[in-house]
Amino acid sequence: QVQLVESGGDSVQAGGSLRLSCAASGSTYSTNTMGWFRQAPGKEREGVATIFGGDSIYYADSVKGRFIISQDSAKNTVYLQMNFLKPEDTAIYYCVTGTLRYEARWSMRPGDFGYWGQGTQVTVSS
């Protein structure tokens, strides 16, 4: 089992920045990918950014150039630096981890990630 605890969600104005953190504990050795998903009101969960194997990074097109994902393996922590935030970034952000096949290392399908945090709210006002 893996436990994930997110922090850093807040309310900001458009154009602002936030940094989310996610601390993993438990059987972290059993997974090879960490990342972030989000879910806006009335919408499905969508992948935001993932790190496969500690160094292969993938972003959703909607956040490329604005968000940066990073990982501190020694601390079992993953971060999401969010810059130039837009109102459409408003959502609950979830930290995820799972084991992906190399051939599907860029996957952002929710079903491919077996462990989810409780979520942290990010609200961006115009």
Image (spheres, rainbow, N blue to C red):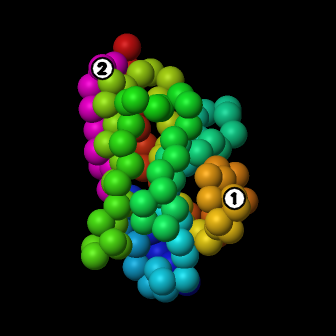
Does 6 appear above or below 17?
A: below
Q: Based on the displayed image, in which of its 4 quarters is residue 7 positioned? A: bottom left
Residue type at mark 1: give it: Ala
Q: Give the left or right position of residue 109, taking residue 125 as reference.
A: right
Name the residue located 40 percent from the left edge and 79 percent from the top edge.
Answer: 25
Residue corresponding to mark 1: 104
Does 1 appear above or below 19?
A: below
> What crowding class fits label 1: few (fewer than 14 Cα within 10 Å), some (14-19), or many (20 or more)?
few
Q: Kindly state the secondary structure of the residue where label 2 is placed.
A: loop
Residue 84's x, y, as percent? 33, 24
Q: How far apart are marks 2 and 1 (CA)?
A: 33 Å
Residues shaded magenta: 8-21
Residue 37's x, y, as percent? 55, 48
Q: Residue 15 carries which label?
A: 2
Magenta span contains residue 14:
yes
Does 115 appear above or below 108?
A: below
Q: Which of 88 and 120 is in front in this view?
A: 88
Task: Classify the position of the C terminus by image quarter.
Answer: top left
Q: Nearer the viewer, residue 4 or 67?
A: 67
Q: Give the left or right position of residue 121, taking residue 77 as reference.
A: right
Residue type at mark 2: give it: Gly
Residue 94's x, y, as percent? 50, 53
Q: Give the left or right position of residue 98, taking residue 76 as reference.
A: right
Q: Based on the displayed image, in which of its 4 quarters is residue 124 positioned? A: top left
Task: Classify the position of the N terminus by image quarter.
Answer: bottom right
Q: Nearer the viewer, residue 65 or 38?
A: 65
Q: Residue 62 carries which label?
A: none
Name the residue located 28 percent from the left edge and 73 percent from the top edge.
Answer: 75
Residue 99 seen from this side = yes
Name the residue located 38 percent from the left edge and 49 percent from the top edge.
Answer: 69
